[in-house]
Amino acid sequence: VGNLRAICAVLAAHGVIEHVSLDLTEIHNLGYYTGITFEVLAPGVGYRLASGGRYDNLVGSFGEPQPAIGVAFGLERLLLALEEKEERAPAPVPAHVLISGGEQAECIAVINRARRLGLHIAVDLEQRRGETLRQLARSQGIGCAIDYSEQSLRIWQTSVEDPGAEAPGVEYSGAACSPDALWQTLQQLAFQQHPSAIAGRETTP
């Protein structure tokens, strides 16, 4: 129950909790699940589109142990659901920013506000820090990495083409690393990406 409450708190912070239903009687027969299991449903389709769950011990059976969660989609069912809605799935878009530390409700709220300005933000669920986070952003072609916590706020501008041209990270600490400071940083990045697109939108905390 405590785990479900924690999951629901994160879903609520992302603004999607109204799309989730909990079923305490649902049981998968696969024995490798170690936590929550889930199914993906869609209006007008009488069967699940996908299913999955948490399986922390499975990966260790084939290599180094690590926490994991997975989901399998039925492509034919997914296509039927898209036909039912008469919409095309959007093409994936590259991220402008990679953020670590986005599990806190206040941080999630700031991220969602920045997304409404058109900033594409990826959240590192493994909570990598420092140089490891910067290298991950570079490997994925993301131009900015942000390491956020209640104690510090570190920002790196990354470069895939010319790593030697990267500027050193900027670090804030104490009161300077509040959610407002993160918001100001993301707001500036949104303006750099497309200044004309955010004219007239929300620009103050």
Image (spheres, rainbow, N blue to C red):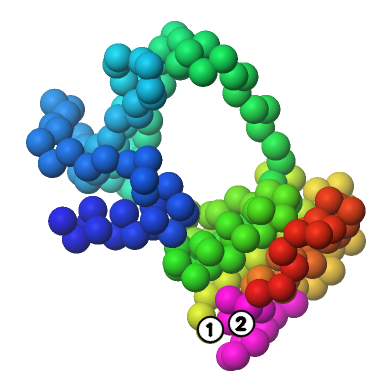
* Side (left or right) of 98 relative to 28: right
Horizontal and vertical percent position of residue 112:
58, 57
- Looking at the picture, tell me which residue is in the foreground, 132 or 102: 102
Horizontal and vertical percent position of residue 40:
35, 29
Residue 130 in view: no
Mark 1 is on which residue type?
Gln
Q: Please report the residue visible at 45 percent of the width from the left and 67 percent of the height from the top.
A: 105
Judge depth for marks 1 and 2 and give the one in front. Answer: 2
- Name the element at disc 2: helix
- Looking at the picture, tell me which residue is in the foreground, 100 or 74: 74
Q: Please report the residue visible at 77 percent of the width from the left and 54 percent of the height from the top.
A: 143
Mark 2 is on which residue type?
Cys
Would you call the spot at circle 1 few (<14 residues within 10 Å), some (14-19), or many (20 or more)?
few
- Name the element at disc 1: loop
Q: Which residues are magenta?
A: 170-181
Residue 151 image label: 1
Residue 127 in view: yes
In the image, residue 86 sits, relative to residue 153, either above or below, namely: above
Horizontal and vertical percent position of residue 193:
83, 54
Task: Say which residue label 2 marks.
Answer: 177
Residue 155 within the segment the image draws in magenta? no
Horizontal and vertical percent position of residue 150:
51, 80
In the image, residue 117 sits, relative to residue 73, either above or below, namely: below
